[in-house]
Image (tube, rainbow, N blue to C red):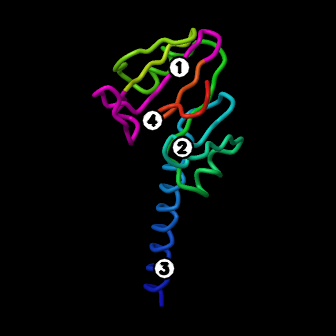
Amino acid sequence: MRALFKNLALALAALVCLACVFVLRRAPLFAGGYGYELYTGDSAAPVLVTRAPLRDKLLRAVAGESVRYAGDRVQELLAEFSAQVRFLEEAGGVTNHYCYTPLLAGETWLYGQRVNLHIACSGERTAVGTPLIFGGF
């Protein structure tokens, strides 16, 4: 009987560990900010603006996410994600940094470059998303 309880306790501990890993893998990638968005598919799929990204990531499959910050946070985000800028685009006073980081899973290809982190900055505000920012800036 004692061995049975021991085995049940081990099985329960393993399930708790698996649940923790599941939750950690669904945790929001970006801290703070405002206007957190989740992408549920390709660029034509609906964008979900959420105040509870952890809850929403636990309840549905997510293909990407983004958030906005006040001010210029480009260098801080590049450092935080150990990201390498692959190329830049400028339009309408916004500089788009298309980057790659080994810290994030998933990727897309743009202009022959592997990209999984997109940072857009106007100087007054910054948006960051993975693999790209699908919502408006």
The quarter of the displayed image where residue 121 is located: top right
Q: Which residue is tagged 1?
A: 120
Per the image, is 50 magenta?
no
For marks 1 and 3, the one nearer the N-term is 3
* Amino acid type, callout 1: Ala
Task: Characterize the local packing of mark 3: few (<14), some (14-19) or many (20 or more) Cα atoms within 10 angstroms.
Answer: few
* Amino acid type, callout 4: Pro
* Amino acid type, callout 3: Leu
For marks 2 and 1, the one nearer the N-term is 2
Which residue does the image show at 48% across and 61% down from the upper left? 17
* Amino acid type, callout 2: Ala
Picture layout, residue 25 above or below residue 89: below
Which residue does the image show at 63% across and 13% down from the upper left? 71
The disc placed on residue 131 is 4
Q: Number of callouts in the render?
A: 4
Residue span colored magenta: 100-125
Give the number of the mark in front: 2 or 1.
2
Depth check: 74 or 3 in front? 74
